[in-house]
Image: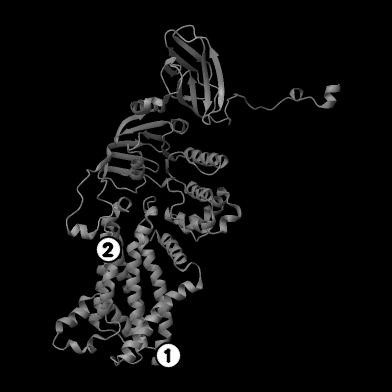
Amino acid sequence: MRYRYLLEQMVRRELRQKYKGSVLGIVWYVVNPLVLMGAYALMFGVLLDAVQIDDYPLFLIVGLIVWVFFSQSLLAAATSLLEQASLVGKVRFPRETVPASVVAVQLVTFLVLLGLALPVTVAVRGTLEPALLLLVPLVACLFAFTLGVALAVAVLHAYYRDVQPILAAALLPWFFLTPIFFRVQDLPGLDGRGWAEVLLRWVNPVAPFVEAVRDVVYAGAVPGGGTLLYVALASAAALLGGWALFRRLQGELAVVL
Amino acid sequence: MSVAAGEILLEGASRSFSVRADRGTTLKELALRRRGRGAAPVRALDGVSLRVAPGETVGIVGRNGAGKSSTLRVLAGIVPLHAGRVEVGGRVVSLLELGAGFGREFSGRENVELNGALHGLTREEVAARMDDVLAFSELGGFVDAPVKTYSAGMLVRLGFSIAAHLDADVLLIDEVLAVGDEGFQRKCLRRISQRIAAGATLVLVSHDPGAIERVCERVVVLDGGRKVFDGPVSDGLLEYHRLIGIEHGGGESVRSGPTVVEDVELLDEAGRARHVFRAGEPLRIALRLIEPPPSALELEVRDESGRSVFRTSTSPAGEAIVFEVERLALLGGDYDLVVGDRVVRFSVADEPGGEGVADLRGTWRAADLSETAPSSGGAAA
């Protein structure tokens, strides 16, 4: 890819600006999901005593880091083109690199968190399963999926300035409907409501990613074939669709920004 | 059909901008179908065709809103056309973007990498240019300090240094560079000349006829998004002056005082009225005075800062008089001719060879010993 060097430079700049070159910078991004994990573990695992899941905090953190990566990437990508408006209006370069670098920075945080969580889960289980190798294609798919949606969100927000606030408002209910602090099959209210299970499992495109990553990292198990297929297809569709939309709309970016 | 490096091709290029609707549209408005249909779009470019050969230097002039900047943005590939075709061969570098995209936390050196990457250079290409860029920028010890500690002048200097080392095939410049001090500006202009000598194409947009005449060999005059002239510089600038003359009196203004001069014209050798002259050219100032002519008339030339460069007076013999200048001994710049109550702004196009105000037309050569200033011993002998 001709612009790999550009992407690398932009990611470096984003990282620097985000973490301001300080160690505490990245620590904050690690602490944030940990605090969330603590709160949910306390509420659902202890006080409400609503879940019968072993090592519930670990179960939580794996889902949380997937969600945090996805949601933070979208929120940051939405405003990314606007923040680089002066650049977009003055220099000709592939504009995809702007949202892409933002998502790549989130990927760095994601990998740091994953790198912290993975040894703990392996140590707790006491076994090193070959299923862990699946993590590489899974993370690649998660990145492609998030990048695709981020490209669409970024270019749409450049045209319609209420995309980001609408997205921000949608992310909270979306979070609660995503199987992060529960397992879909454990939900007692699902009896006789097959449609709700379909909705939670398959209509929400983030759910299969959360479940697949959690199957591998938390349980050391190979995810179901349907889930894996869904993940592969969803990431390809999101990336192609998002990119096509971006290409289609990017010509006027210098004018609308 | 593709174009050669440095070649520019515009064919029936049209582009309009809507004044209102583009900015701040929301999904909510889209859903409620309240999208503003108010102001009609403005045609910034209206069927402009232009072909520039590699190595040409073209000036684009026109009034405000004539489409000059839009042309540059189209050539830079930043704004797409609505109709027509644009093709630019090779690497396009526009000097309107100096310092765009600098990371504030980054050092000068790191920003060179980032900016080079933005312009499509590879890691190796950036590394190969790094020392030259940093040396050119004259930033000294600051190259490793974060850019946020730089002064505005330092930022522009670094920005220009990067742009100057991109090996552009096409250079786009909007208005004359205001980069740092005079010395650095001259260095920039030299660097640009070098690129042109090496075969790069230059497109310069400017309101300053002097700058156009100094740099360009061809002028395109735009008006209302259309090309109204394309040809030699002196004719093009005449056309431009005719255009702006419609708006505000052709660079002339009136001072307070009794009217003694009815008309002033600056004529060249061929008797054509011009406002831009080459240093060393003959110049005729033709005056038509009131009847009866005043007993005394003063003529003065002032430089841009208002300093008097030359002053003379006469007692006019009739209502039509001419002040004949055999050789315009001024160097490049803008000057005001003040005659009676009239002020006429004119420009002198720069010829390399000196700086300052007056053109002494001296030449350098090796001297014989006998010509040198006598030493004390020689004087005694």
Quarter-of-image position of residue A134: bottom left
Judge by depth and name the residue closer to the eye, A13 or B261. B261
Dot 1 lies on which element? helix
Task: Name the residue furthest front.
Answer: B257
Mark 1 burial class by Cα count in 10 Å: few <14, some 14-19, many 20+:
few
Quarter-of-image position of residue A34: bottom left
Counting from the top left corner in percent of width and height, residue B48 is at: 29, 37
Instruction: Tell me what residue is drawn at x 24 percent, y 82 percent.
Output: A225
Judge by depth and name the residue closer to the eye, B293 or B329. B293
Q: Is residue B155 above or below residue A60?
A: above
Counting from the top left corner in percent of width and height, residue B296 is at: 52, 11
Counting from the top left corner in percent of width and height, residue B168 is at: 44, 45
Quadrant containing the C terminus of chain A is: bottom left
Q: Is the C-beta separation of discs 2 and 1 under 8 Å?
A: no
Mark 2 burial class by Cα count in 10 Å: few <14, some 14-19, many 20+:
many
* Residue A215 at least partly seen: yes
N-term-proximal mark, 2 vs 1: 1
Dot 2 lies on which element? helix
Subunit under mark 2? A
Residue position marked by numbered label 1 in the rendering: A123
Instruction: Tell me what residue is drawn at x 21 percent, y 78 percent.
Output: A202
Q: In this view, does A216 lie above or below B210?
A: below
Distance (Cα) linking label 2 and label 1? 43 Å
Instruction: Tell me what residue is drawn at x 40 percent, y 91 percent.
Output: A124
Amino acid type indicated by mark 1: Ala
Subunit under mark 1? A
Quadrant containing the N terminus of chain A is: bottom left
Residue position marked by numbered label 2 in the rendering: A163
